[in-house]
Image (tube, rainbow, N blue to C red):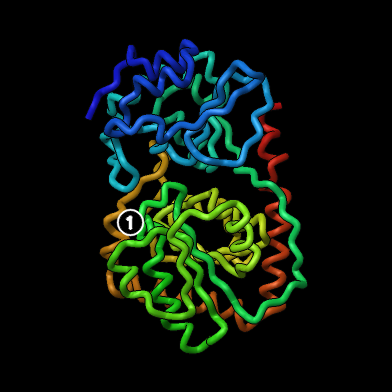
């Protein structure tokens, strides 16, 4: 682990406007993997825009930089999601330079995708300056033209991995739970199909033998991914915590979602309106008003038998309910598309800079 102090070029670069490429050359964060967690876009040909997630964004505004976060762990380079500790974060050495970066007058906004995070982050860093810069804004996605009259004999469930496509994230996003549900339901519904766009752990890969499961382990082009979404009926994301981009991408196609009740899903899923929330993930991720998200990823692989069974039963029930009630399903789809086009539109997302 390399400790970064206030005079480290990463900090000075953000605060004193060193060119982004120069910062990447000297940054050795995350075990030396340079640039993995930052992307940049040129603004007005001279200024840089930094963010640490991957939302669709059109930064044609005269700003110097802002940070765009889903949860506080995005900002911490030496503490991983899933095993953070409240006392450690409150006394973390990184808090000093985070405060230094975020209080700089070159940092214009700290934009949170989750409202409860926008309230907790300034508390964690104990800063009124950061509080005044922090806003909540739902992620924005480009609108899609969808033909709801297009029919297909198949009912397709889509599962996708995170942008980094780490194979073990298949578990963190609840892929193993979905496979159990699918193995139960495909016996009853021969038109049911599961499409997986994810790299897979070897132990999962060797046990998939159903002709009704299609797996895409390689990254797809935008055209291929668009086609995948167009042909899908439902997204199931029984994840340890929210993944806003995955959800909003599905919503833009009018695809409802079945999710866990992990951290912050309740801010994006309105039960029985644009999807369903499955109970049972309370000890995996939850909110803490003093730090934000609190997680224990170990628990997703060590569920009590009763909890595991309860999750499977709920998920199967919701999937069956949508298969067997076409009118209700179509209402859900139209609700989802309408919510996406209003709350999660690119225009709405860009509003915050005005």
Left or right of 60? Residue 244 is left
Q: Is residue 91 above or below residue 214?
A: above
Q: Is residue 26 above or below residue 40?
A: above
Q: Is residue 80 above or below residue 354?
A: below
- Give the quadrant of residue 26: top left
In this view, the residue in front, 25 or 57, is: 25
For label 1, the residue is 168
Q: Is residue 181 above or below residue 336?
A: below
Q: Pick out the residue farthest to the bottom.
A: 188
Regarding residue 260, the answer to whether it shows in the image is: no
Q: Looking at the rendering, in which quadrant would you find the N terminus? A: top left
- Give the quadrant of residue 270: bottom right
In this view, the residue in front, 3 or 163, is: 163
Q: Residue at x 46, y 88 (%)?
A: 187
Left or right of 319? Residue 58 is right
- Residue 350 place in picture, x, y as percent: 68, 34
- Residue 256 place in picture, x, y as percent: 61, 64
Left or right of 173? Residue 272 is right
Q: Residue at x 40, y 65 (%)?
A: 175
Counting labels gives 1
Q: Residue at x 38, y 19 (%)?
A: 10
- Give the quadrant of residue 121: top left
- Residue 140 place in picture, x, y as percent: 64, 43
Is disc 1 placed on a helix, strand or loop? loop
In this view, the residue in front, 210 or 179, is: 210
- Residue 346 place in picture, x, y as percent: 69, 42
Q: Looking at the rendering, in which quadrant would you find the C terminus? A: top right
Q: Residue at x 43, y 60 (%)?
A: 217
In this view, the residue in front, 347 or 22, is: 22
């Amino acid at each position: 682990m390399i400790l970064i102090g206030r005079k480290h070029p990463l900090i000075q670069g953000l605060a004193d406007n060193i060119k982004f490429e120069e910062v990447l050359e000297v940054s050795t964060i995350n075990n030396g993997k340079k640039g993995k967690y930052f992307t940049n876009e040129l603004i007005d040909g001279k200024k840089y825009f930094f963010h640490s997630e991957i939302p669709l964004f059109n930064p044609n505004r005269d700003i110097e930089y802002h940070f765009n976060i889903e949860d506080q762990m995005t900002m911490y380079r030496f503490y991983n999601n899933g095993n953070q500790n409240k006392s450690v974060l409150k006394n973390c050495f990184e808090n000093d330079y985070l405060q230094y970066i975020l209080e700089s007058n070159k940092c214009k906004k700290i934009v949170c995708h989750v409202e409860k995070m926008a309230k907790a982050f300034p508390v964690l860093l104990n800063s009124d300056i950061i509080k005044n810069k922090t806003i909540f804004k739902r992620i924005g996605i480009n609108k899609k033209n969808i033909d709801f009259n297009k029919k297909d004999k198949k009912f397709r469930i889509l599962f996708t991995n995170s942008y980094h496509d780490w194979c073990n994230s298949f578990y963190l996003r609840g892929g193993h739970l979905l496979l159990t549900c699918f193995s139960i339901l495909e016996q009853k519904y021969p038109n049911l199909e599961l499409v997986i766009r994810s790299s897979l752990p070897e132990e999962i890969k060797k046990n998939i033998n159903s002709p009704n499961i299609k797996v895409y382990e390689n990254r797809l082009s935008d055209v291929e991914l668009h086609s995948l979404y167009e042909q899908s009926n439902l997204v199931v994301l029984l994840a340890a915590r929210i993944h806003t981009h995955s959800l909003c991408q599905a919503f833009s196609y009018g695809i409802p979602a079945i999710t866990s009740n992990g951290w912050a899903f309740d801010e994006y899923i309105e039960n029985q309106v644009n999807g369903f929330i499955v109970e049972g993930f309370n000890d995996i991720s939850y909110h803490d008003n003093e730090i934000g998200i609190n997680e224990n990823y170990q628990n997703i692989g060590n569920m009590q038998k009763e909890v595991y069974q309860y999750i499977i039963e709920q998920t199967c029930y919701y999937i069956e309910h949508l298969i067997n009630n076409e009118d209700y399903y179509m209402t859900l789809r139209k609700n989802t598309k309408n919510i996406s086009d209003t709350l999660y539109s690119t225009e709405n997302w860009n509003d915050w800079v005005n």
